[in-house]
Image: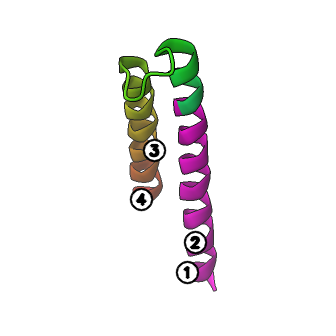
Amino acid sequence: IFSNQFSYVHSDFYSAHHHFRACISSETRKRCDGSQSGGAASRFSKQILDRALSFLQEQCQNY
């Protein structure tokens, strides 16, 4: 049972991260990159969010 709950939370977490990352990327592109795809601000925001997710994954695995 615990394994199934962990899988559900794990997939929920990734789904939420993906949607949040897409929203931040879209808004950053609109406001900072002049709607230019792959602008510096959009790349930076994606990198920061991906690093934050990696940090959280490490913390959860080592808990």
Q: CA distance from mark 3 to mark 1?
A: 21 Å
Residue drawn at the location 56% of the way across and 65% of the way down:
11
Which residue is tagged 2?
A: 6
Which residue is tagged 3?
A: 53
Residue drawn at the location 60% of the way across and 25% of the way down:
27
Given the image, on which type of amino acid does mark 4 rest?
A: Gln
Secondary structure beneath label 3: helix
Residue depth check, mark 3 versus mark 1: number of the one nearer the observer? 3
Residue drawn at the location 46% of the way across and 16% of the way down:
33
Q: Which range of residues does the magenta coloring cover?
A: 1-25
- N-terminal of the pair, mark 2 or mark 3, is 2
Residue depth check, mark 2 versus mark 3: number of the one nearer the observer? 3
- The percent coordinates of residue 1 (x first, y second) are 64, 86
Q: CA distance from mark 2 to mark 1?
A: 5 Å
Residue depth check, mark 3 versus mark 4: number of the one nearer the observer? 3
Which residue is the extreme one toward the bottom?
1
- N-terminal of the pair, mark 3 or mark 4, is 3
